[in-house]
Image: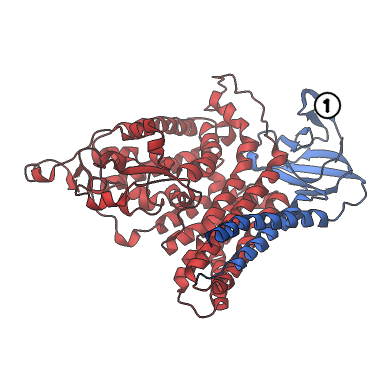
Chain colours: A blue, B red
């Protein structure tokens, strides 16, 4: 009887893991495909301590033509995972572009072109100290299909259903 | 597994009378340096060591390393009670003890005898009505309402931390033992809650030895150690909540009966009062609010929280009301609804609403801890390079002590943060569901009843985690 109980106990976490994985795969596959790639002209305004737009929704493969302007002080635009860091000057249409992979090279331009080749959620953050709340100045670029999110929802629901099934398998001790 | 037996040098170290002084003194010196830097250094938070070290490095280490692995080890080295305890004991290392047989002879001695130790100050008992963590709950929520200022203005950090050390000193002179730590310190409140999950505990090795012990030096003190400053009797200790890891009981036990046990995550599973349950709600509400304000893209919310600069008084009031009502009313109400529904679905049973409420609130402890770890992770990974800068230039005055002052701001793997946060949250959810089910099985006799009672709670816990998925990965 003890062996049976031990076997049941060992199987419980396995059930949860299986449901988690199934939920994750279902969520991953259920993510809507991204629309066809397109070229987008995006003007980003920076101010203490936010960007306008706060959230950029684009598709994988899109070509973004980005321009920047600051409403108040010098700000930065560091885009996670995209080798792009911009220094934005107050009320000036031109800005400095650096590549974190090659920080010595600085270009002064009025537009930077970025091809979005990764899906997911990427924050853009201010990279030049701009005031008290500087470390928290950020926006979000959400690149469809952002499969992590539906996959995580699926995994969360998988854990719930797996957990409920494990609970339902338990028997009241005699 | 007793770590003292496994690593005898550790036992030797904590058994020295000078142990606590040796571990507090360095943090006290650092603390004083932080206060100086906060007062006289750069007003820009990320250029000042007090903000970078306290709110980025210390916070991450506290919530992600110290609490889950070493319980209230922070309380062992915390500098807040240093001056108060010194004045209360008039000793940094030594013990003042009186042999009970010599008590009459010592009557003329200065100080007040509590147990067998002699203390100074008024040594009053802490009021019974305040003997809970409600003060800490309200104090912490009040402090966190101003967190946008606290986290970004060195001088605000100086004022708050300086006030806490002053308050601790004054309360040590009025009340006996560590009343400040037990009932007032805002940090202590959430440490007490999350220490339940910790993988270490201090317990008596053999309860029978304690039962037979006539000395009770752990509680009353003796010439080897002070009586427990937290007022706990180690033999009856069944949770980490109110054990400050000061190691005095290790020194004072005449039978060498104290153990530092390694245990599995989340071994303490009982909340004992509504104050503790509300602490769990408050911590959940704050994690949600901080994730929205500090990790979110919404500028207007940052302006509301950052009231002293934005002057958005109306927005700040809205933010404050939403935070307080959310933490004290809305989240507890949603939770209570899940508990009420579960009890109704369970059918006839003997578990009271209070028993079920407190039992079902426990899963919020491991879940809350994991949510806080997930929240704190990007603060360190993204802003960790500031640590290198301020080590070389702690005041932001242009020094370069170790050649790292000009290190560029370099976020570490920021694009991978959601991929770390999601598994952390999933682990927290799985653990919370397991803990919730165990509570249900304990409270309801029939498994079918337990299952029905547990289901609404499981849905609420899952929905909570899905909300954080949306914020971090959606």
On screen, residue B472 versus residue B318, left or right, reads right
* Residue at figure coordinates x 60%, y 61% from the top left: B461
Q: Is residue A88 left or right of residue B186?
A: right
Q: Position of residue B283 (x, y in %)?
A: 53, 54
Q: Nearer the viewer, residue B346 or A165?
A: A165
Tell whether B12 sits left or right of B456.
left
Residue A109 in the figure: left or right of residue A6: right
Q: Residue at x 55, y 76 (%)?
A: B346
Which residue is disc 1 drawn over?
A107
Q: Callout 1 environment at 10 Å: few (<14), some (14 to 19), or many (20+)? A: some
> From where the camera sits, is residue B325 visible?
no
Does residue A103 appear in the picture of this structure? yes
- Residue B272 position, x and y percent, is 41, 62
Which residue occupies the extreme bottom position in the image? B348
Marks counted in the figure total 1
- Which of the 4 image quadrants contains residue B262? top left
Name the spot of residue B234 as percent of width and height, x first: 32, 50
Quadrant containing the N terminus of chain B in the rendered view: top left
Disc 1 element: strand
Give the camera-side residue of B207 and A98.
Answer: B207
Residue at the far left: name it. Answer: B105
Q: Is residue B115 above or below residue B40?
A: below
Tell me where residue A45 sits by quadrant.
top right
- Which chain does tag 1 point to? A
Residue B366 location in percent, x, y?
54, 53
Residue at 55%, 60% in the rendered image = A5
């Amino acid at each position: 009887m003890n062996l049976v109980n031990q076997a049941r106990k060992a199987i419980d976490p396995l059930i949860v893991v299986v449901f988690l994985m199934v939920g994750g795969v279902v969520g991953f596959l259920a993510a809507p495909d991204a629309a066809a790639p397109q070229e987008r002209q995006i003007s980003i305004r920076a101010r203490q301590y936010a960007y306008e737009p706060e959230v950029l929704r684009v598709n994988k493969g899109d070509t973004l033509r980005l321009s920047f302007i600051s409403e108040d002080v010098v700000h930065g635009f560091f885009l996670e995972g995209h080798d792009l860091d911009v220094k934005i000057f107050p009320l000036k249409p031109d800005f400095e572009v650096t590549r974190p992979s090659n920080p010595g090279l600085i270009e002064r331009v009025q537009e930077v072109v970025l091809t979005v080749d990764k899906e997911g959620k990427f924050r853009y953050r201010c990279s030049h100290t701009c005031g008290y709340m500087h470390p928290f100045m950020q926006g979000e670029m959400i690149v469809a299909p952002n499969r992590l999110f539906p996959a995580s929802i699926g995994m969360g629901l998988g854990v719930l259903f797996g957990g409920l099934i494990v609970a339902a398998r338990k028997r009241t001790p005699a | 597994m007793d770590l003292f037996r496994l690593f005898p040098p550790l036992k030797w170290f904590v058994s020295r009378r000078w142990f606590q002084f040796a571990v507090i003194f360095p943090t006290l010196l650092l603390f004083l340096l932080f206060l100086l830097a906060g007062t006289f250094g750069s007003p820009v938070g990320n250029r000042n060591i007090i903000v970078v070290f306290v709110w980025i490095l210390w916070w991450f280490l506290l919530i992600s390393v110290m609490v889950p692995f070493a319980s209230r080890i922070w309380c062992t080295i915390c500098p807040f009670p240093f001056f108060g305890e010194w004045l209360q004991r008039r000793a940094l290392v030594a013990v003042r003890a009186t042999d009970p047989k010599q008590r009459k002879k010592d009557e003329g001695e200065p100080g007040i005898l509590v147990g067998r130790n002699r203390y100074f100050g008024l040594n009053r008992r802490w009021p019974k009505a305040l003997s809970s963590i409600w003060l800490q709950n309200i104090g912490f929520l009040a402090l966190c309402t101003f967190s946008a200022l606290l986290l970004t203005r060195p001088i605000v950090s100086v004022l708050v931390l300086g006030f806490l050390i002053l308050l601790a000193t004054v309360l040590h002179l009025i009340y006996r033992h560590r009343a400040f730590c037990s009932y007032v310190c805002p940090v202590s409140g959430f440490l007490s809650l999350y220490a339940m999950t910790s993988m270490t505990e201090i317990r008596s090795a053999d309860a029978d030895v304690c039962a037979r012990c006539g000395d009770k030096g752990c509680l009353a003190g003796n010439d080897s150690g002070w009586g427990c400053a937290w007022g706990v009797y180690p033999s009856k200790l069944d949770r980490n909540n109110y054990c400050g890891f000061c190691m005095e009981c290790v020194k004072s036990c005449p039978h060498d009966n104290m153990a530092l046990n390694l245990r599995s995550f989340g071994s303490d599973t009982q909340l004992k009062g509504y104050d503790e349950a509300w602490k769990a709600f408050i911590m959940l509400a704050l994690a949600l609010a901080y994730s929205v304000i500090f990790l979110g893209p919404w500028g207007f919310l940052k302006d509301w929280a950052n009231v002293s600069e934005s002057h958005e008084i109306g927005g700040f009031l809205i933010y404050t009301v939403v935070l307080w009502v959310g933490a004290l009313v809305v989240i507890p109400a949603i939770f209570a609804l899940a508990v009420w529904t579960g009890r109704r679905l369970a059918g006839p049973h003997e578990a009271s609403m209070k028993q079920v409420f407190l039992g079902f609130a426990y899963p919020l402890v491991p879940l809350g801890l994991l949510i806080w770890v997930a929240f704190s992770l990007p603060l360190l990974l993204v802003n960790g390079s500031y640590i290198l800068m301020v080590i070389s230039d702690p005041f932001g005055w242009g020094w370069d002590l170790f050649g790292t002052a000009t290190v560029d701001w370099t976020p570490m793997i920021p694009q991978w943060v959601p991929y770390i946060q999601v598994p952390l949250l999933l682990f927290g959810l799985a653990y919370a569901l397991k803990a919730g089910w165990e509570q249900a099985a304990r409270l309801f006799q029939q498994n079918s009843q337990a299952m029905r009672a547990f289901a609404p709670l499981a849905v609420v816990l899952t929905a909570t985690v899905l909300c954080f998925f949306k914020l971090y990965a959606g």
